[in-house]
Amino acid sequence: MSQMRKRRSFGTIKKVTQDGRSCLEASFPAPLYCFHRYLQINLPARQHKVDKEKEEQVLDYWLKRAERDIELNVWVPQYSFYIALRRNVNFN
């Protein structure tokens, strides 16, 4: 018997196949204020996270945290952390 997934008010979690393996993928729409705030990043319309261990609780937490951060207007795209790290790393 298959389980019925509850309807989410924010984001989606769905089954996907990646490299021949079954995984779960969570996604949510990027907030509109971020497209203007992060012009240096080619920000995708939806933010995605894949969990190869198929643990829905991990993805559910990720979605809830993103929703909270968006409501507080403090959400930052994952890419900006990597860009900040690259700018601040000195290899000399």
Image (tube, helix red, strand yellow):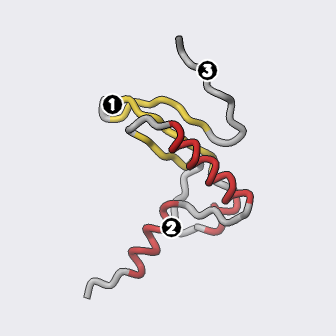
Q: Could you tell whether 6 is left or right of 17 in the image?
A: right
Determine the residue positioned at 66% across, 28% down: 6
Number of other residues with Cα within 10 Å of mark 1, as a class: few under 14, some 14 to 19, many 20 or more:
few
Amino acid tagged 3: Met
Of helix, strand and loop, which one carries label 3?
loop
Labelled pair 3, 1 in contact (Cβ < 8 Å): no
Q: Nearer the viewer, mark 2 or mark 3?
A: 3
Mark 2 or mark 3: name the one nearer the start of the chain: 3
Q: Is residue 43 left or right of residue 91?
A: right
- Label 2 to label 3, Cα distance in Å? 36 Å
Mark 1 or mark 2, earlier in chain: 1
Q: Mark 2 and mark 1 in contact (Cβ < 8 Å)? A: no
At numbered mark 1, what does the secondary structure look like: helix, strand or loop?
strand
Above or below: residue 73 compared with residue 63: below
Q: Tell me residue 86's x, y (percent).
A: 39, 75
- The residue depicted at 48 percent of the width and 68 percent of the height is 81
Identity of the amino acid at label 2?
A: Ser
Instruction: Look at the picture and state if 34 lies above or below 29.
Output: below
Say which amino acid is labelled 1. Answer: Arg
Residue in front for this viewpoint, 35 or 22? 22
Between 2 and 82, the residue placed more toward the observer is: 2
Residue denoted by label 2:
80
Q: Nearer the viewer, mark 3 or mark 1?
A: 3
Q: Secondary structure at mark 2?
A: helix
**Percent position of residue 52, x then y:** 38, 39
Q: Where does label 1 land, which residue? A: 21
45 lies above or below 18: below
- Quarter-wise, where is residue 17 in the image? top left
Q: Which residue is mark 3?
A: 4
